[in-house]
Image (cartoon, grey):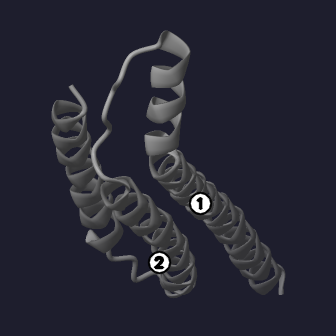
Amino acid sequence: MIRPMLMDKNTTENQKSSKIRNRRVHMANERTFLAWIRTSIGIMAFGFVVEKFALFVKQISYLLGKEVVPPPRGYSSFFGISLVALGALMGMLAFIRYKKVEKQIDKDTYQPSLILDILLTISVLAIGVFLVIYLIHSI
């Protein structure tokens, strides 16, 4: 009679420690989600700054008394709006990934996904290339 009680106690402790481990993993998943959200907000803010960059260059040229001709407004507007849209898309993909990983953690079938990582890498590369081209044209 003592043995079944000990087994039940051990089983309960194992389940409890399993829940604690899962809680930690869920919190790590939430921290990752929040990091992706911060990144997407940063990309959207950068898009806003890029969209307003032509106006800033024009105002600085007036202050300095020089005739600086920035690239046509279409470049910065198009790219700025694209960055804001990309940031919003990344926020949505981050939420989808968060929910997917949450279910995988509960089922103990976690499989990493590279879609968001690849999207972020491509977007940073595109931003860099665009800024180099944009700055070359503004010289």
Vertical position of residue 1 compared to residue 83: above or below: below
| Closer to us: 40 or 66 | 66
Residue 10 position in % (x across, y down) = 71, 71
| Closer to us: 55 or 15 | 55
- Which amino acid lies under the numbered mark 1 shown in the image of this protein? Ile
- Which amino acid lies under the numbered mark 2 shown in the image of this protein? Leu
| Closer to us: 90 or 10 | 90
Measure how far apart labels 2 and 1 are at the Cα level.
10 Å
Which quarter of the image is occupied by the C terminus?
top left
Residue 61 position in % (x across, y down) = 45, 22
- Tell me the crowding category of disc 1: few under 14, some 14 to 19, or many 20 or more residues within 10 angstroms, Cα based: many
Q: Which residue is mark 1?
A: 37
Judged left or right of residue 105, residue 20 is: right
Vertical position of residue 39 compared to residue 107: above or below: above
Q: What is the secondary structure assignment of the residue under circle 1?
A: helix
Residue 72 position in % (x across, y down) = 30, 52
| Closer to us: 18 or 97 | 97
Q: Residue, x 48% and y 11% (percent of image)?
A: 64
Q: Can the viewer see residue 103?
A: yes
Tell me, for residue 92, which label it has, or none.
Answer: none
Residue 43 position in % (x across, y down) = 48, 53
Q: Residue, x 26% and y 40% (percent of image)?
A: 131
Q: What is the secondary structure assignment of the residue under circle 2?
A: helix
Q: Which residue is mark 2?
A: 93
Which quarter of the image is occupied by the N terminus?
bottom right
